Image (cartoon, helix red, strand yellow):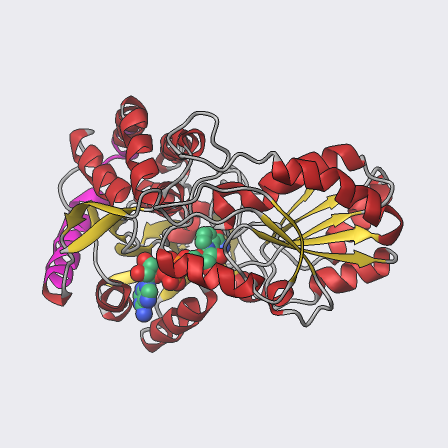
Amino acid sequence: MTEVINPATAAVFTSVPSNGVEETDAAIERAQRAFGSWRQVAPGDRARLLRRFAAVVDAHIDELADLEVRNSGHTIGNARWEAGNVRDVLDYYAGAPERLSGRQIPVAGGLDVTFHEPLGVVGIIVPWNFPMPIASWGFGPALAAGNTVVLKPAELTPLTAIRLGELALEAGLPEHVFTVLPGKGSVVGQRFVTHPAVRKICFTGSTPVGKSIMAGCAEQVKRVTLELGGKSANIVFADADLERAAAAAPASVFDNAGQDCCARSRLLIQDSAYDRFLALLEPAVKAFRVEDPALATAEMGPLISAGQRESVASYVGGADVAFTGTAPTGAGWWFPPTVLLARSTSDRHWREEVFGPVLSVLPFRDEAEAVRLANDTEYGLSGSIWTRDLGRALRVSRAVETGALSVNSHSSVRYWTPFGGMKQSGLGRELGPDAPQSFTETKTVFIADR
Ligand code: NAD
């Protein structure tokens, strides 16, 4: 059993079973058997089941959100959005089974037709920072394409995934089509990688673990998508609406206590606007409400664990602190929003993914330097550009090596547009209209005309 802790109080409030290799093998084998009949379900019926799953999730939004607040320390506002996102993802991909059409390609001597065949069992491995949405970005399109799914939640945050597994059955999904298997990454997750019946791994998590999973998948030439770490830049040009950019900057990095792969944790400010922007940013950071995440007014809750708080603190000690916000003291893994001035691009807090409420700031001279600094990282997941010059917005958007950018906004993820990283932030584009195809093999069949 694994104890589950409320990060806002540090109190253990429940425990869940931790599966071993034997249980994992048995679940994968059941999922493989269930695949035989799930792939045969008529597309319209599969669509109806996914819509029903969405409706059952919708009826349990408050319950799921409360569970996430207690298990993950997410603010209640965020947690409701996350549960609603699962419902929306299921509704969106419920449109896919009836649209998974192939092509017909005229060739000499006949015709080629293509089919999108489901893969079989898909293994989804999820991190602790957004337990519900990230799971659904995998299982929504995977199930829609006719695969069965085994899902491993993160050790620290298994509760909402376990509940989603129950809700799927309540909605009428056949048994073993969608199985949630809490347990250790090195045991359950690793077995997904090594078990030959698992035909694709859909991994979201840290870059080091992603690399080892990719190497493991290579052994069996297993398909893999990797959604990994980030160190995204928020680039503010002097011609931008500085008030708007400064008002948006705190949430762009402190949302979910900075435990967000898309966090704009490197703030690049054009030197002529540097002092003015920091003067606008300081009150916005100080006003950011860090409090009991169950309160409707909370904008940020605690960090996920004692270990995470220790790791985040290690980036702040010895650094130049510009200013900080406030956070509760006492029990729980609290950490205040913190703004650091980078001395150079070799500062550890500038280079590494902190995964906490820490923002690093650096000035730049001109557009060319902004692009160079933004790209001076192994990551490439997200980022923002603030300017009133449309041409510059386009030029910089094309030049920054990152998968999901926003102009005059910090919004990154929509389930109906592709989402994923470049460089060491990942491989593959989850979400968007083509995601179900990435859970299929394209088969080509030649039909002779004589
Ligand atoms: P992590 O890599 O430690 O763990 C992620 C998952 O992998 C967990 O379920 C864990 O149990 C499992 N795991 C660990 N070792 C494994 C192994 N050897 N084999 C198989 N599975 C294994 O990541 P984390 O600390 O849970 O999450 C934070 C990281 O996730 C950050 O780097 C963040 O940027 C990244 N992330 C990326 C995205 C994205 O879409 N790009 C989204 C959210 C989080």
**Point 87% across, 41% down: residue:** 239
Name the residue furthest front: 330
Residue 214 on image: x %, y %: 40, 70
| Quadrant of the drawing holding the N terminus | bottom left
At x 40% / y 34%, what residue is drawn?
292
185 vs 251, nearest the viewer = 251
Q: Is residue 396 left or right of residue 200?
A: right
Pinpoint residue 31: horizontal percent, then vertical percent.
17, 52
Q: Position of residue 91 (x, y in %)?
A: 38, 29
Q: Which quadrant: the C terminus?
A: bottom left
The image quadrant of residue 208 is bottom left
What secondary structure is the magenta-colored segment mainly? Answer: helix
Tell me if 359 is positioned left or right of 19 in this view: right
> What segment carries the magenta color?
23-47
Left or right: 72 as drawn, with respect to 56: right
Q: Report the residue at 13% width, 53% height from top.
A: 17
Query: Residue drawn at (52%, 38%), measured in percent from left and top?
Result: 414
- Is residue 281 rendered magenta in the image? no
Is any atom of residue 111 visible in this view? no
In terms of image quadrants, where is residue 86? Answer: top left
Instruction: Depth check: give the residue in front, 109 or 320.
Output: 320
Q: Is residue 162 above or below residue 362?
A: above
The answer to whether residue 125 of the structure is visible from this angle is: yes
Q: How many marks?
A: 0
State the image coordinates of residue 343 (x, y, percent, origin top left): 73, 66
Ligand 1, image quadrant it occupies: bottom left
